[in-house]
Image (spheres, grey):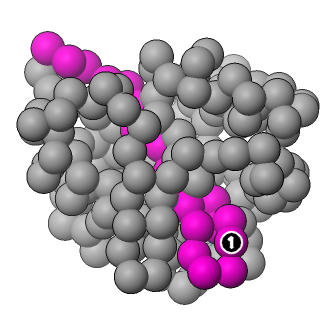
Amino acid sequence: MKKLFSEIPRLQSARLTLKALTADDADALRELTGSPNVYRYLPTFLYEKKYDDAEYVIRHLYDECFQDSIILGIFDRDGFCGLAEFYGYRDEIHKISIGYRLLERCWGKGIATEALGLMVDYLYGETDIEIITASTMLANQASAGVLRKNGFSLVVHDVGEDWGYETPTPADKWIG
């Protein structure tokens, strides 16, 4: 079994590839981070939103950010679809949290469901992770559906969580 953070994984299905971002992905990353609809249900402190320069984000993603999270690009045959993230790693209890965000034009195509399935299969099949969690804002029913389709169970409903806003954000907690 691999230790999480021992490598940047590359995950693949017949339709999708989850892999490290490169400089060639800067325009697509700008499109993603520039969409208020994509980020309306997400924390304010996400790494890709930390800097205005997408090239800088990509150049430093796997040195500055890799200590706390693993961010992978989600790609289909047409190119960049969004981001997948492993974060909140707790080595002592073999726990990680997961997240994903897609370009608006990729919504409703099953991409998030398939990407999450690849992430779960990798974590349980190839690493020492034993617990996978996720959080969603209450209004984000699309993301809740993606989690349900991948076998996640709602364990806590409407709990205040720090999402980087002035007050705690009401969120649902999931476990896979």
| Observer-nearest of 61 and 112 | 61
| Observer-nearest of 103 and 156 | 103
Residue visible at 21% across and 28% down in the picture:
3
Membership of 14 in magenta stretch: no
Q: x%, y% of residue 159?
A: 38, 35
Q: Is residue 5 left or right of residue 137?
A: left
Would you say the magenta stretch is mainly helix, strand or loop?
Answer: strand
| Observer-nearest of 37 and 51 | 51
Residue visible at 30% across and 66% down in the picture:
117
Quadrant of the snapshot with the N terminus: top left
Q: Is residue 175 left or right of residue 24?
A: left
| Observer-nearest of 170 and 142 | 142
Residue visible at 34% across and 26% down in the picture:
5
Q: How many numbered circles does the render carry?
A: 1
Is residue 19 placed above or below 67 in the rendered structure?
below
* Label 1: element kind: strand
- Residues rendered magenta in the picture: 74-92
Q: x%, y% of residue 36?
A: 82, 54
The answer to whether residue 158 of the structure is visible from this angle is no
Instruction: Identify the residue under disc 1.
Output: 79
Residue visible at 46% across and 28% down in the picture:
69
Q: x%, y% of residue 127?
A: 17, 39
Crowd rating for badge 1 (residues with CA inside 10 Å; few <14, some 14–19, many 20+): few
The answer to whether residue 105 of the structure is visible from this angle is yes
Is residue 77 placed above or below 25 in the rendered structure?
below
Q: In this view, does 66 lie to the left or right of 104?
A: left
> What's the residue type where badge 1 is placed?
Gly
Membership of 80 in magenta stretch: yes
